[in-house]
Image (tube, rainbow, N blue to C red):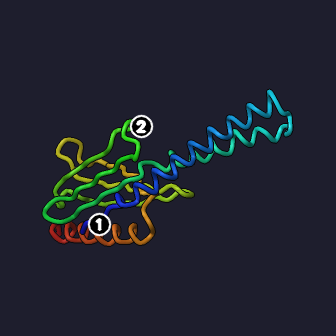
């Protein structure tokens, strides 16, 4: 099964650009109010705080682009940001038989996928992917696919 949200990258770029413009507008409006017009009192700090908070939330949600491929004998995970220099993209590929378990953790609006794979050196390794920008249907499809692989691995081991 293949799953990706790369087709939504233009939407995420648009939202990011709009948030940056909102921050610049907020800073400009705040500075104009403080040093020139004095139209708004202490409420002018909202012009700074709100846009910056929205931009921080956008980036705290994590990497926007998630790709998953379970076709063939290997599982392939890619997780990248729409802004390439912000952080390094994650790319992991491993055989299906190494998958031990997975867990999807949701805290408020942040979703993370934790994959546990068997490792020769340390016994098991946990890989983390950010899936906050996947729709609920995509998350459910991902769960179904990973459940199939985990179940097949459990049957082989028994």
Q: Nearer the viewer, mark 2 or mark 1?
A: 2
Q: Nearer the viewer, residue 155 or 152?
A: 152
Residue extending furthest toward the top = 35
* SS for callout 2: loop
| Residue 158 percent coordinates (x, y) | 17, 69
> Is residue 130 found left or right of 31 in the rendered image?
left
Residue at point 36% right, 40% down?
Answer: 84
Count of marks placed on residues: 2
| Residue 63 percent coordinates (x, y) | 41, 48
Classify 10 Å Cα crowding around label 2: few (below 14), some (14-19), many (20 and above). Answer: few
Rendered image quadrant of residue 3? bottom left
Q: Nearer the viewer, residue 81 or 35?
A: 35
- Is 114 above or below relative to 140? above
> Is residue 89 found left or right of 97 in the rendered image?
right
Classify 10 Å Cα crowding around label 1: few (below 14), some (14-19), many (20 and above). Answer: many
Residue at point 13% right, 62% down?
Answer: 73
Contact (Cβ within 8 Å) of mark 2 with mark 1 = no
* SS for callout 1: helix
Residue extending furthest toward the front = 36
Which residue is the site of mark 2? 86
| Residue 153 percent coordinates (x, y) | 20, 66
| Residue 101 percent coordinates (x, y) | 30, 60
Circle nearer the N terminus (2, 1): 2
Q: In the image, which disc is placed on residue 124?
A: none
Q: CA distance from mark 2 to mark 1?
A: 29 Å
Location of the N terminus (image quadrant): bottom left
Which residue is the site of mark 1? 146
Residue at point 65% right, 40% down?
Answer: 25
> Is residue 58 found left or right of 90 in the rendered image?
right
Residue at point 79% right, 39% down?
Answer: 44
């Amino acid at each position: 099964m293949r799953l990706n949200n790369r087709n939504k990258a233009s939407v995420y770029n648009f939202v990011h650009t709009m948030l940056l413009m909102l921050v610049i507008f907020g800073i400009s409006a705040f500075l104009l109010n403080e040093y020139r017009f004095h139209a708004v009192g202490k409420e002018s700090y909202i012009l700074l705080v709100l846009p910056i908070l929205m931009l921080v939330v956008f980036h705290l949600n994590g990497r926007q682009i998630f790709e998953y491929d379970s076709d063939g004998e290997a599982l392939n995970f890619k997780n990248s940001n729409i802004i390439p220099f912000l952080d390094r993209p994650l790319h992991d590929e491993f055989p299906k038989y190494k998958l031990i378990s997975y867990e999807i953790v949701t805290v408020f609006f942040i979703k993370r996928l934790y994959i546990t794979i068997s490792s020769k050196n340390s016994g098991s390794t946990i890989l983390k992917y950010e899936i906050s920008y996947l729709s609920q249907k995509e998350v459910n499809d991902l769960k179904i696919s990973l459940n199939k692989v985990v179940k097949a691995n459990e049957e082989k081991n028994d």
